[in-house]
Image: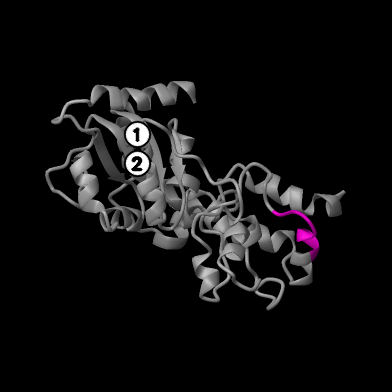
Amino acid sequence: MTTIRREQLAIVEDCRGDDCKPRVGVYALTSCYGCQLKLATVERILDIVKAVNIESFYMLSSNSTIPADVDVAFVEGSVSTEKDLEELFEVRKHSRILVALGACAVNGGVQSWVEGEMDYDQLYADVYGDETIDMQGRQATPISAHVDVDYYLPGCPPEEDEIMYFISSFLFGTFPEPKDYPVCAECRLAGNPCILIEHGERCLGPVTTAGCKARCISFGVPCIGCRGPVPHDTAWFDSLALTFQQKGLDEEVVRDRMRIFGAHNPHLEKMLNKVYGSENE
């Protein structure tokens, strides 16, 4: 972390003139492009483009290149083709700080949900049969499986206030703190009734990383875990397994639902063991 902070401070130190701005690149691997779209449409996008030089962002400008030498690179999408992998290596080599942008880049996304259950050849046969495609595909993986990632910005897509927080942190030479508490905390702050306990909905808020302000639950929709498993053993474990099981959420059900967005997350099995461990012993 010390090295990273030096890099960030260097961005500020290197840009003290009026004409000098941090250089930013936004790149997309295999994805729906929703995270880029979210970044491109934040309310203060004009303030952002005044504060930084956008060196590469194809959604905003065709005058973009891959790779470009940048201070901060935001990368959306999972590595699902050989071309994705080649571009990711080049982006990493040409950026001081690399941020995984969104659920696909952070945890592999929904295209990774069968990780460990089906290999690439099985998936290909199910989708394309004997047909051939132009690109060379791969089993979908998060970008951290291939390059060093400095920061993770989760969500499907990430929240606007978190995008602004990340960019502001880099501009001030500091670093964005990760969320280490579950959606439940924000749901209670929003004044919502607990749809898991009170209505029996299969809500994953207790084991999902916060940051969305419990938007789905506020509209009566159970959390499906798009921000990935909460890190650092900080899920609300008190009576959680008992509550889940009373509502029909045993370990396999929670695992299957969390794998939709978090199949590659290194905290998933550890978190499940923390929740259900005492019953497995």
Judge from the rendering whether residue 255 lies leftward or rightward of residue 153; answer left or right. right
| Amino acid type for the residue under numbered disc 2 | Ser
Looking at the image, residue 253 sits to the left or right of residue 187; the answer is right
Residue sitting farthest toward the bottom = 199
- Count of all numbered marks drawn on residues in the image: 2
Question: Dividing the picture into quarters, in which one does residue 143 lie?
Answer: top left
Residue at 18% across / 38% down in the picture?
65
Amino acid type indicated by mark 1:
Phe
Residue 220, image x, y percentages: 55, 76
Residue name at image x 77 percent, y 66 percent: 243
Quarter of the view holding residue 184: bottom right
Horizontal side of residue 208 vs 20, given as left or right = right
Q: State the extent of the magenta-drawn residues as a range.
A: 236-242
Name the mark on residue 137: none
Contact between marks 2 and 1 (CB within 8 A): the answer is: yes
Q: Which residue is mark 2?
A: 168
Residue 160 placement (x, y as % from top left): 37, 55
Q: Which residue is mark 1?
A: 172
Q: Give the quarter of the image for residue 37.
A: bottom left
**Which residue is painted at 39% across and 43% down in the image?**
166
Is residue 245 positioned above or below 208 on the image?
below
Cα separation between marks 2 and 1: 6 Å
Q: Is residue 144 above or below residue 94?
A: below
Closest to the observer, 20 or 119 = 20
At mark 2, the secondary structure is helix
Q: Is residue 40 left or right of residue 34?
A: left
Q: Secondary structure at mark 1?
A: loop
Query: Which residue is at the front of the view, 157 or 66?
Result: 157
Residue 126 is a magenta residue: no
